[in-house]
Amino acid sequence: MSKNDVILPKDFPELKNDTFLRAARGEEPEHVPVWCMRQAGRYLPEFREIRAKKDFFDTCRSPEDCCELTLQPLRRFPFDASIIFSDILVIPQAMGMDVQMLTGKGPTFTDPLKEPEDLQRLKANVDVNKELDYVFKAITLTRHKIEGKVPLIGFTGAPWTLMSYMIEGGGSTTHSKAKRWLYRHPESSHMLLKMLTDVIVEYLLGQVAAGAQALQVFESHAGILGPVEFKEFSLPYLRDIARRVKDRLKEKGQDVPMIVFAKDAHYALEELSASHYEVVGLDWTIDPRSARERTGGKVSLQGNMDPCALYAPKELISDIVKKMLEGFGTRGYIANLGHGLYPDMDPENVAAFVDAVHQHSKLAVKQA
Ligand SMILES: Cc1c2[nH]c(c1CCC(=O)O)Cc1[nH]c(c(CCC(=O)O)c1C)Cc1[nH]c(c(CCC(=O)O)c1C)Cc1[nH]c(c(CCC(=O)O)c1C)C2
């Protein structure tokens, strides 16, 4: 395939490993599927090599680079799913904000939102097919190049998480600037959250049209909200996204599983399991058995090994995985970490994690 060929979102190769999709729909495949958040990342030397040559968001805008970075971990590990390489901050960019990825500092907005009047600076009607076309192209290209090995997951940041970045202007420990809006400017906060929701719905639908076979919504900053604020400023939008995406897909006779990952939102597990998502992603602060009890078999679960357990010796990783599998069971379960891989993690230990999930779960399924 030459670089200039037009690659269309059709005639995709047949899917050979559907364990992830079956588990997402509540089934019990022959082994528990496993993937890792940030599986395309700096812990891989081949990732660092590509990233060293180009600016982060220029990399995101290159479908060829995104495709290559998405495929890299699949060459090393028998993951059961892949996630498209991109970033959640492409949405604020599409709405007209300038965001740079600064080495050692992370994402940085040149001109964050300060007061409600600043909402007027944002593009209200974003044409995702124009502004985020590069993500759709990356998805289509990757879905072809993956050759049906595993499904491809598309993703987005959730409205509150994106709102907090747009106001903080980057990473933050307190998120106090963004939370100040919730308490001081609740109406403008809802206006912004609604604007983001509208873009996110179109963005997710565009990803499915381009070839994404599942969708994950990252509410990474849920934990900075208390239960009351979460119910007012996060949950309604998470629900709205799932309902609108599902309704629109249904009209076309389509259906893709959706995962919600609201980090540190253990207080909202019951609500999250009744929010129209097939899968609820969990961080490592939740005990697997109590997560099962609290979600009452309504959803599949994904997670939740402490990423730092990957610093343990391989035998201990295997024991931790075994206990995690005993807690979650093997039906309606997707193994993952409770958050992303860190750059200093050893790829060999990632291999040990994937292997342990496959081996222990195969035995457990057979014995059941
Ligand atoms: C690998 C990577 C990404 N983004 C960033 C990096 C590291 C920087 C680099 O390569 O130079 C910067 C990058 N992008 C972001 C950060 C966090 C900064 C901060 O808030 O402190 C950094 C360092 C913002 C971001 N970006 C993302 C989230 C949600 C998930 C999470 O909670 O971690 C968030 C919060 C999503 C994301 N981001 C990325 C993916 C790709 C697919 C995969 O998981 O393999 C995904 C799903 C890719």
Image: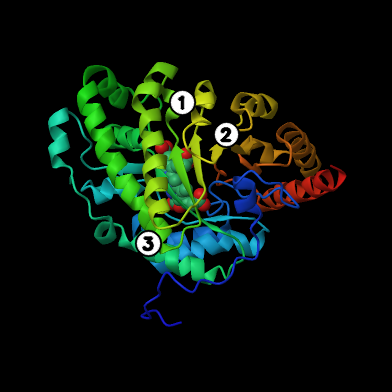
Residue 9 vs 363, above or below: the answer is below
Q: Classify mark 1: helix, strand or loop.
A: helix
**Which numbered mark, 2 or 1, is in the foreground of this view?**
2
Secondary structure at badge 2 equals loop
The answer to whether residue 56 of the structure is visible from this angle is no
Callout 3, which amino acid?
Answer: Phe
Q: Secondary structure at mark 3?
A: helix
Left or right of 215: which side holds 99? left
Q: Contact, CB < 8 Å: mark 2 with mark 3?
A: no
Amino acid type shown at disc 2: Leu
Question: In the depicted view, which residue is nearer to us: 124 or 44?
Answer: 124
Note whether ligand 1 is within 8 Å of mark 3.
Answer: no
Point out which mark residue 282 bears.
2
Alpha-carbon span between mark 2 and mark 3: 27 Å
Q: How is the image coloured?
A: rainbow
Q: Is residue 35 above or below residue 320?
A: below
The spot of residue 322 in percent (x, y) is: 78, 38
Q: Position of residue 189 (x, y in %)?
A: 25, 28
Label 1, ligand 1: CB separation under 8 Å: no
Q: Which residue is mark 1?
A: 223
- Given residues 210 and 220, the one toward you in this image is 210
The answer to whether residue 361 of the structure is visible from this angle is: yes
Q: Give the mark, 2 or 3, whose residue is nearer the N terminus.
A: 3
Amino acid residing under circle 1? Gly
Quarter of the rendering occupied by the C terminus: top right
How many labels sit on residues?
3
Q: Which residue is mark 3?
A: 136
